[in-house]
Image: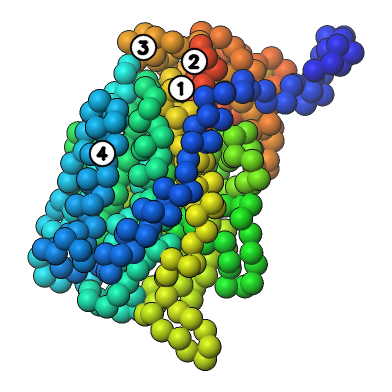
Amino acid sequence: MTLSRLVFCLIFSSLPCAYAQDKVDYQDQQKLHDIAAQVSADNIENHITTLVNFGTRHTLSETQSDTRGIGAARRWIKAEFDKISAQCGGCLQVYFQSGTISGEKRIPDATEVVSVIAIQRGQTDPGRYVIMSGDIDSRVSDVMNSTSDSPGANDNASGIAGTLEAARVLSKYQFNGSIVYAALAGEEQGLFGGKILAEHAKQSGWRIKAVLNNDMIGNIEGINGVIDNTSARIFAEGTRQTETQDEARTRRFTGGEVDSPSRNLARYIDWMADRYIPNLDTMVIYRLDRFARGGHHRPFNDLGYPGVRIMETNENYNRQHQDLRTENGIKFGDTIDGVNFAYAAKLTALNAVSLAGMAWAPTPPANVEIKGAVQPSTTLSWQMASPEQAPDLAGYKIYWRYTDAPQWQFSRYVGKVSEFTLENVVIDNYFFGVSSVNKEGFESPVVFPGAAGAFGE
Ligand SMILES: [Zn+2]
């Protein structure tokens, strides 16, 4: 805000003062630039090549061979996480997580669905989690075909390669919160690996603040002929799946349709792209996933956890879920020549800086509430993080925006308090939220008040 504007506001103290608040400012984080720069396209290429060379990674494929099938693939992924962990003094807890699925349309007979999980424990708040995921399994035209070659290079070896590479880079740092790197199984057969992990997390009381599900992050040549390596999509659901009738009634009168925690997680990642990933613009899409299609963030949303799908902007349907063949001169199949490794690295870097930013920041404010009807001011309150969880807590920042604006527009840092009143900001005309900030300036996503926007305790 300029001095003349400030004087104008002090004298006239009218609505334009609210408009004239400083645009959202932030502290540039060199550590996040360093993290983005360390992500290697060569490593991602090597990982995808290895995964493709397992021939098929179909969920019902064989598990005994060490060179072909889903068993070989998951053992290799576990060995890679173990290698990364060995290089950071055992900083990752690596394990198989399995469940037996049967009687399902796409898994009729009892089958072990086995994911690979690696956890990097947080230092001050280990019960708080952010998760990056990709999918191990692949498929061709017939979803039950478990023997034909099914390279799944982009869908979704790219997501696994990115998750391994993010783990390698981030394991060199220590964070306040925990980071989970998840290679999930059984996606194409019905999102089973994600369901198993989400249910385990719920039973274990994990405080999940973000699931970044990466599903197809390497294709830059759309079926429509567009070639684009400068944009990506973040899909985020609207009203949360777990909303009760009472909560829906409250939301009708106070808002929140476009401010689920998944949406504000998406806005956070969008900011990270603008700040730390040159030549990448993300499109936040107000939808659970692509039209009538699904992905592994959904089982987490189903249980009320914030989660989004990160993926390429331009899909090539000739390369998805297709038998390897050539028809009328068109080559079909998800082969490695359809993956752009530099682009996959760019989206991996976006994941890495977003995970790091959240894991360094204090836990997002809990129990955020708002009041201010029939008065020319707006009061927000929230629960402060405990000194044990967030010894480096600096304070809180209030955000607001016009109700039809996609991104937060205005902000005010209010310090280490649990309540603040914005004078001359009329509650009716904006949406509001609060973030937490640590002493280095790392900031949590913005939390919209009430059940509609809550990131949990
Ligand atoms: Zn798929």
Horizontal and vertical percent for residue 77?
26, 49
Instruction: Work out whether residue 124 can be spotted.
Output: yes
Q: Nearer the viewer, residue 431 or 111?
A: 111
Q: Sequence order check: which comes first, mark 1 or mark 2?
A: 1
| Quarter of the figure with residue 168 | top left
Q: Residue at x 32, y 41 (%)?
A: 181
Q: Residue at x 34, y 64 (%)?
A: 52
Q: Which of the two marks, 2 or 3, is nearer to us in this view?
A: 2
Identify the residue under disc 1: 361
Q: Which of the two marks, 2 or 4, is nearer to us in this view?
A: 4
Identify the residue under disc 2: 438
Report how far apart the C-alphas of labels 1 and 4 lie in the structure: 28 Å
Q: Sequence order check: which comes first, mark 4 or mark 3?
A: 4
- The relative height of residue 129 versus residue 46 in the rendered view (above or below) is above
Instruction: Work out whether residue 103 can be spotted.
Output: no
Q: Sequence order check: which comes first, mark 2 or mark 3?
A: 3
Identify the residue under disc 3: 386
Report how far apart the C-alphas of labels 4 and 3 lie in the structure: 35 Å
Report how far apart the C-alphas of labels 1 and 2 lie in the structure: 6 Å
Amino acid on which disc 1 is placed: Ala
Query: Residue 188 has which mark?
Result: none
- The relative height of residue 71 versus residue 166 in the rendered view (above or below) is below
Amino acid on which disc 4 is placed: Lys
SS class, disc 4: helix
Q: Nearer the viewer, residue 35 or 363?
A: 35
Query: Residue 83 has which mark?
Result: 4
Callout 1: 10 Å neighbours few (<14), some, many (20+)? many
